[in-house]
Image (cartoon, rainbow, N blue to C red):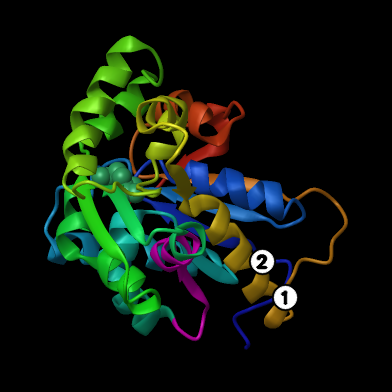
Amino acid sequence: MSVCTSSLPIGVFDSGVGGLTVLRALRELLPNENFLYLGDTARVPYGTKSPESVTKYALQAGGALVREGIKMLVVACNTASAVSIDALAAEYGPLPVVGVVKPGAEAACATTINGKIAVIATESTVNGGAYQRTICSMHPDAEIIAYPCPLFVGLAEEGWVEGELVEAIVARYLEPLFAAFGEVGPDTLVLGCTHFPVLRKAISNVAGSAIRLVDSAETTARTVENILSEAKICNTDKDKGQVSFLATDSAQRFAAVGGSFLGVEIDTNDVRVVDL
Ligand code: DGL
């Protein structure tokens, strides 16, 4: 494949800073790879937008990364993965295009024992039904209930990730979701949004130890690793890989908020502002 060379970066995009949780998992698993991350911070959130708008934005974000030169496109945004993955693959194939929904669904099926799977995500992801369809295609007997938790996005961006107030909000969303399963509740809860891993502790405290949390970031990183090695495009450079950031709005805000999602500080000077 002429567009793929091993030293090119892996392009990763999200509606904003949330996808840095996916980049974090990718960097942990693939430390030698170079990454180019694009956060469409001027247009976040995607999770409340129509499928037409999400696909238009996703194609523009993907296009910007492709023009920079990448060897693979990772759609870190659950909403864009749920709504626009086919359009992205059609537009940018034969470049490998990987979303987070399929790896998350696979992990949920591998985790559940009682076949009852709860999914929390943005409104657009839930309404589009991609998690429900994908899990169902892998585990036809599964009972899946998906529920939107839009306030979690704001809490994560505000850095309000633990404590009584946060757990009260988490409980307000999760209690009706779990009750909807009836007498036997779910044993698996899919964190179907880039921002939710940041709230993992609060979600886990409310869900209780009987419910296992599935984070699509980790499973997506493993999928990317497999595709790289099957396509023989792993970076063979022994040095630690480089990460560059693009944002469509303020570099300062991207760096200030993004650090907690990536797990390391981001220098404003490392963020280039682009217009899509
Ligand atoms: N990145 C989005 C997702 O994973 C969450 C934020 C948004 O609504 O854009 O669905």
Label pair 1/2, CB-CB below 8 angstroms: yes
- What's the residue type where badge 2 is placed? Glu
Q: Residue at x 60, y 71 (%)?
A: 71
Q: Secondary structure at mark 2?
A: helix
Measure how far apart labels 1 and 2 are at the Cα level.
Answer: 6 Å
Q: Residue at x 14, y 59 (%)?
A: 127
Q: Quadrant of residue 8?
A: bottom right
- What's the residue type where badge 1 is placed? Ser
User: Which label number is shown at residue 17?
Assistant: none
Residue 268 % position (x, y): 52, 28
Residue 96 on the magenta span = yes
Q: Which residue is mark 2?
A: 225
State whether residue 118 appears in this view. yes
**Stretch of the chain drawn in magenta:** 93-107
Quick check: 253 above or below 196?
Answer: above
For the N terminus, the image quarter is bottom right
For the C terminus, the image quarter is bottom left
Residue 87 % position (x, y): 29, 77
Q: Which residue is mark 1?
A: 229
Q: Is residue 174 left or right of residue 221?
A: left
